[in-house]
Image (cartoon, helix red, strand yellow):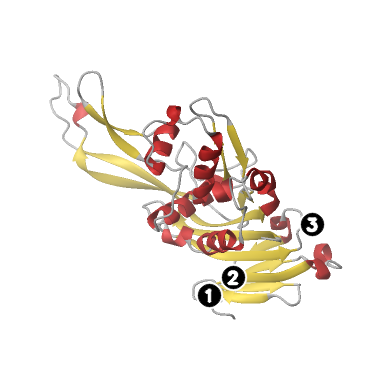
Amino acid sequence: MNKRVYGVLGVSAIMANWNADFTGYPKTTTNGDTYGSDKAFKYPMKKMWENQGEKVLYIKSMKLSPDKKGEVNLVPRSLKERYEYLFNIDDLKDCKDTSEVLKNLFSAIDVKNFGATFAEAGMNISIPGAVQFGQGFNKYRDTEPQEQQILSPFRDATKTTDENGEAKNSTLGTKIVSDEAHYFYPFVVNPDAYNEFVKLGVTEGYTDEDYLKFKETSLVSATAFVTNSKEGCDNEFGLFIETDNHLYLPNLTEYIGFEKGDKQNTINIHLKEILGGLESQIQVIEIYYNPITTIINCDLEGVKYFNIVTRKEV
């Protein structure tokens, strides 16, 4: 792949919790700005790839493990165990060829995109990812968390006491969501990150095929990832700027604004000043959005617009 790609990916959360902190509330900075971590965006992509049959290394998987008392417990695999399971290896400690491990790591689609830190069985391997995400900040100023009380169908048996007997009431739970939030993630695709590994012969590098898989999954994985807290989260925006290999652009989310409308929202994109004069180094600019729910106000010319749901040109 002989180009760089700079862009922004947008996720909307309507009565949903895109990325919670340990209190259950949507993540915020110390000054109160709501944001989502890069891990929150990568995880649905990994789950989608796994469901499609791709090899995904850095994802939680479970196993049944007997303990010393003979009890069988459900526990997460360690990184070593996940590697052995994924690549059908009896014991990683028996592998003395680091190049073999590197080739296996690069065959995992999440490692190929996001890199890896692999310190197992005496090996210390670091792979900086070709795809790098920033934090996704919410651009909608009026976001408010909503706390819902949920009645469980079961009583809490741990509340049984000698004095009062068994607990007589069902337990209450809490679900916390954002009434509405719109997260915008900056990203960059840099195929040069793997040049040294290409020279070592352990990978063919980051290819156009790798990029297309990343691009397609990044535009649908949030919508496809349906859990109780993520239902209501959708991919709503994608900006992809493909450039020559030696053009370097800053964080593009700083030039994007969001305005709430009665029937349609508006995403404002002001990149003319920063991209002016660089036209000869820019190969293509694409914007994906839902024209039913969103209006795009972009000051650039020659942009290709696509429906993010149908992929048809608008």
Identify the residue under disc 1.
311
Position of residue 305 measured from the top left corner of the image (x, y, whole percent)? 63, 76
Q: Secondary structure at mark 1?
A: loop
| Mark positioned earlier in the residue sequence (2 or 1) | 2
Give residue 244's quadrant in the image. Answer: bottom right
- Residue found 48% across the figure and 49% down from its top: 43
Mark 3 → mark 2, Cα distance in angstroms: 25 Å
Residue type for callout 2: Tyr
Mark 1 → mark 3, Cα distance in angstroms: 29 Å
Q: Nearer the viewer, residue 281 or 208?
A: 208
Vertically, is 57 above or below 277? above
- Front disc: 2 or 1: 1
Task: Verify CB contact (< 8 Å) between mark 2 and mark 1.
Answer: yes
Q: Secondary structure at mark 2?
A: strand
- Looking at the rendering, in which quadrant would you find the N terminus? bottom right
Residue type for callout 3: His
Position of residue 16 measured from the top left corner of the image (x, y, whole percent)? 44, 54
Position of residue 32 measured from the top left corner of the image (x, y, whole percent)? 61, 43
Mark 2 → mark 1, Cα distance in angstroms: 8 Å
- Residue found 29% across the figure and 40% down from its top: 172
Vertically, is 106 above or below 293? above
- Please rate how many residues cluster around mark 2, counting C-alpha atoms within 10 Å: few if below 14, some from 14 to 19, many from 20: many
Identify the residue under disc 2.
288
Residue type for callout 1: Arg
Q: Secondary structure at mark 3?
A: loop
